[in-house]
Amino acid sequence: HTFIFSAVISACEKGGEWEKALRLLTIMVQKAMEMDTINFNACISACERGGKWEKALQLFARMEQSKLDSDAITLSAAIGACEQGGKWEKALQLFNILTDSKVESTAIEFNAAISACEEGGRWEEALQLFSAMSYSKVESNTITFNAVISAFAKGSEQEKALQLFKSSLQVTVEPNTRTFNAAIQACAKRDDWSEALHLVHGMAEHKVEPNMVSFNAAICACGKGGEWRNATHLYGAMICIRVGIDTVTYSG
């Protein structure tokens, strides 16, 4: 029976059926069946993929209470859950456990931990992980740069955000809308309307589509600089390419 339950739970994980996976795990508990790391891994991963980060972390805590050994799969999924919930301290704790286990961390674990730090506004910790990634010879990607740039911007380190953005264009990383948005938002926070406009216009060169966030941040920068004509031109561009408009657009 245990083997059958394990196989079905794993199938639920692959199919994104986190509720069914949890239901089966509960039945195993009720029937006092022996559970192992694989069962918990499948349920934690299913919850993490389903965006149920709280349930994923609850399962991880329950796993620790049961004295079951966690492995790289467990820790990777739990770090991903921490990212979703902005639990940067727990993410760093788990990342350190993963590092101490002598298992080589991949870009997935690094990115999840860095993103958790970004969500928590912890740019120093995000930068440390970014540096450790380079030291460990793990290749950074667009997700990495986006998270670190955003962490700088949220931490009022606008100059660092823009410097890293420019560095990202010089390596093999392909910037996307989020990359540009983080840089444009950094410009808005430091009242640099000229650079914000330059970035919005430069998106086409990289075949990146601006969205409402891109325009709103640039309009905000122009508004702070008294550049109402440029702000009006940006608003017109939003109408022209049918980008959504919200209250932030008008308040800019």
Image (cartoon, rainbow, N blue to C red):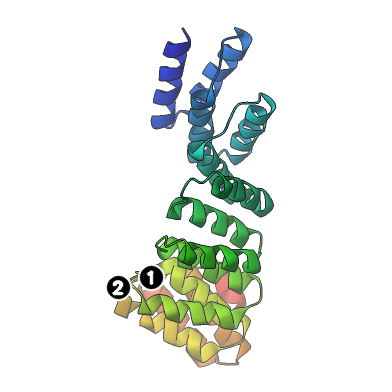
Q: Is residue 121 above or below residue 196?
A: above
Q: Amino acid at mark 2?
A: Lys
- Residue located 45% across and 28% down the image: 17
Please identify the quarter of the rendering in which residue 68 is found.
top right
Q: Is residue 103 above or below residue 170?
A: above
Q: Is residue 137 left or right of residue 115?
A: left
Q: Nearer the viewer, residue 250 or 85?
A: 85
Q: Nearer the viewer, residue 115 or 242?
A: 115
Find residue 99 and report its horizontal and vertical position in percent.
Answer: 55, 50
* Pointer 2 local density, CA inside 10 Å: few below 14, some 14–19, many at least 20: few
Give SS at disc 1.
Answer: loop
Please identify the quarter of the rendering in which residue 192 is found.
bottom right
- Residue located 56% across and 33% down the image: 70
Give SS at disc 2.
Answer: loop
Residue 18 visible somewhere in the drawing: no
Find residue 223 and report its horizontal and vertical position in percent.
Answer: 59, 86
* Pointer 1 local density, CA inside 10 Å: few below 14, some 14–19, many at least 20: many
Q: Which residue position holds label 2?
A: 207
Residue 226 visible somewhere in the drawing: yes
Label located before the other in sequence (2 or 1): 1
Q: Is residue 133 left or right of residue 156?
A: left
Residue 228: give its label.
none
- Residue located 62% across and 80% down the image: 189
Find residue 180 and report its horizontal and vertical position in percent.
Answer: 45, 74
**Could you tell me how far apart the alpha carbons at marks 2 and 1 are, in whole angstroms?**
9 Å
Q: Is residue 58 left or right of residue 24?
A: right
Q: Which residue position holds label 1?
A: 175
Dot in front, 2 or 1: 1
Q: Amino acid at mark 1?
A: Pro
